[in-house]
Image (cartoon, rainbow, N blue to C red):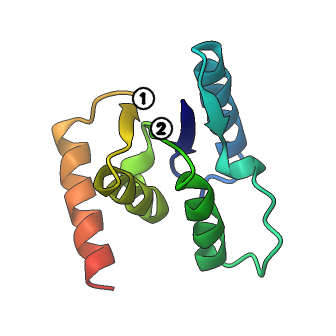
Amino acid sequence: MKTYVSGKISGIEEIAPFLFAEAEIELKKQGFKVVNPLTINHDHDLSWESYMKEDIKEMCDCQAIYMLSNWYNSRGAIIEHDLAKKLKFKMIYEKELTFFQKLKLAYMRFLIRNS
């Protein structure tokens, strides 16, 4: 099953490659074909919007999405999560969210809708 890895990148650019690579390795061990957004060729103006457009194009060719545990703290990952749910992807989570993480997610969605 082709699976897209989603999680926070902006603000943690130094460690994000390690987090995404670790998830990619684990998913491949389980037999998944993995799309890692950090390995997608980004030949554009390098704006956040351009990254999202390219990543979402790749994501749409997948059947599942793997949400890193930090996804609720990322505007882009929240958008990817919500789109994947609407498109009926298999949803795979690194771990369950705590009440406070869910509260922060709700607040982030509110900010996105009102920005």
Mark count: 2
Identity of the residue drawn at 25% across and 55% down: 104
| Above or below for 1 versus 11 | above
Identity of the residue drawn at 51% across and 47% down: 7
Q: Is residue 93 left or right of residue 42?
A: left
Q: Is residue 14 left or right of residue 60?
A: right
| Above or below for 30 versus 67 | above
Residue placed under numbered mark 1 in the picture? 94
For the N terminus, the quadrant is top right
Q: Is residue 88 left or right of residue 71?
A: left
Dot 2: within a 10 Å radius of its alpha carbon, few (fewer than 14), some, or many (20 or more) residues? Answer: some
Residue 23 or residue 10, whichever sits in front = 23
Q: Secondary structure at mark 2?
A: loop
Residue furthest toward the bottom? 115
Residue placed under numbered mark 2 in the picture? 68
Q: Secondary structure at mark 1?
A: loop
Identity of the residue drawn at 66% across and 43% down: 36
Q: Name which residue type carries label 2.
A: Leu
Question: Is the Cβ of the residue at disc 1 closer than 8 Å to that at disc 2?
Answer: yes
| Mark sitting earlier along the chain (1/2) | 2
